[in-house]
Image (tube, rainbow, N blue to C red):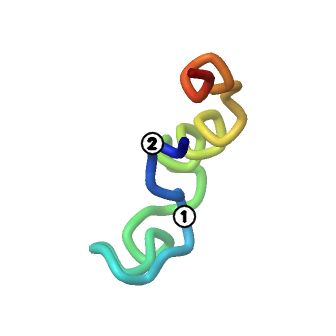
Amino acid sequence: MKRFKDYSPDQQLLLPPDLNDWLEDGHLAYFIRDVVGELDLCQIYDD
């Protein structure tokens, strides 16, 4: 059973329309996005 909405960093429907327009290269937000994308969440998803 899925509990979370799909994450799409390139999604154009929420503000800001494009994260790249608001943040400069090397911003901490890009690092956090990459780290979160690599997390092993199997313990959270397992019932």
Q: Mark 2 belongs to which amino acid?
A: Arg
Q: Nearer the viewer, residue 36 or 40?
A: 40
Q: Is residue 20 above or below residue 28?
A: below
Q: Residues within 10 Å of mark 1 (few under 14, many from 20)?
A: few
Q: Where residue 13 sits: x, y (%)?
A: 36, 82
Quick check: 1 left or right of 5?
A: right
Which numbered circle lies on residue 3? 2
Residue 31 in the image, given as x and y percentages of width and height: 59, 40
Closer to the eye: label 2 or 1: 2
Location of residue 41 (image quadrant): top right
Dot placed on the residue nearer the N-terminal end, 2 or 1: 2
Q: At 53% across and 38% down in the image, what residue appears?
A: 32
The numbered disc on residue 21 is: none
Point out residue 21 in the picture as x, y percentages from the top left corner: 43, 77
**Quadrant location of the N terminus in the rendered image:** top right
* Residue for point 55% across, 22% down: 44
Q: Is residue 11 above or below residue 34?
A: below
- Please determine whether, in this image, residue 43 is positioned above or below residue 14: above
Q: Is residue 20 above or below residue 3?
A: below
The residues tagged by marks 2 and 1 sit, at their Cα atoms, a distance apart of 19 Å
Numbered circle sitting on residue 9 = 1
Where, by quadrant of the figure, is residue 47 drawn?
A: top right
- Label 1 is placed on what type of residue? Pro
